[in-house]
Amino acid sequence: MSKPLITNLYSREESNVIAFGVILGKKAAESVKAVRDASWFIETFDIISKRNLLERAKVYDIGDIKPTSYAELDNVTKTASSILLEGKLPLMLGGGHLATYHALKAMPKEVTLVVFDAHCDLRESYIDEKIVELDYIGEDVAVDKRLNDATWLRWASEEGMFKKAAVLGVRSGDEEQLAYAKKKGISLITSEKLLSQKGLNAAIRILSTLTRGKKVYVSLDIDVFDPSIAPAVDHPEPSGIGFREFTKLVRSIKGKIVGCDVVCLRKISYDEVTEFLAARAIFEILSRAT
Ligand SMILES: [Mn+2]
């Protein structure tokens, strides 16, 4: 690890947030590094709300987990569990969204899941060439058709890994996934809705109610943002939300955030807009979580 996430001023003992990367996918190492590097160049003071977003967040970065087999993804669960045991907040940097499934395994079963994502990720099984690249572990490891980036939320649901869930900013899915979400009571709130003031206000109310008094896990897939402001993602989808909608939604989360992640950034060499956005989004989540 070259630079840790955010100027690391705290020891593990002093910290209340422990960050770690999960190197899952062909470009994951450079993508996670890009977010860490960008985090050094962003003002932590928010001039709009006139407060330091990292006022209470004491971050310690333990570096990366580099699984070389599917079995080793268990290290994600173990790492998140040990951070929780220390009474601290795990903050995971991905890598593919499959890592979230493994982090979620460490969370209390009654957790409420808040996912920002352009995609439903509720398929029962699915694989395409991109997922093969994104969930790439090694030459000799075939990518799992059942449990991967496109299906992780389905299996987290099937395995009872959360009590309630909302996916915000969604704009890609099919009838089968919509029916599944309805059956399971998973709220899908489209980006179309969030882009109108009325729809955003309604979503803020839904999110506040859903999370009040609850333990909350927040997962941010960077592709929730419009590709014009976040081009370096695995699967760009048109008509995404802006940063303004995101901050309003994060700030409306009630309850206690017990875990969080920022995933699915895929570094492109000529662009650094996306990693700056991702780092700033992490500051927003931490300001709400600590
Ligand atoms: Mn996605």
Image (cartoon, grey):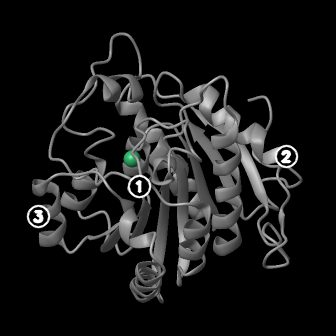
**Figure quadrant of the N terminus:** top right
Residue 167 x %, y % = 36, 65
Element under disc 1: loop
Q: Amino acid at mark 2?
A: Phe
Please tell me whether residue 140 is drawn above or below residue 266 in the rendered image: above
- The answer to whether the residue bearing label 1 lies less than 8 angstroms from the nearest atom of ligand 1 is yes
Instruction: Give how far apart the Cα atoms at labels 1 and 3 are.
Output: 18 Å
Give the residue at x 35% y 70%. 166
Q: Earlier in the sequence, mark 3 or mark 2?
A: 2
Element under disc 3: helix
- The answer to whether the residue bearing label 3 lies less than 8 angstroms from the nearest atom of ligand 1 is no
Element under disc 2: helix
Please tell me whether residue 42 is drawn above or below residue 181 in the rendered image: above
> Would you say 43 lies left or right of 254 here?
right
Residue identifier under label 1: 117
Mark sitting on residue 179: 3
Mark sitting on residue 98: none
Instruction: Give how far apart the Cα atoms at labels 2 and 1 are.
Output: 26 Å
**Figure quadrant of the C terminus:** bottom right
- Res 171 quadrant in image: bottom left
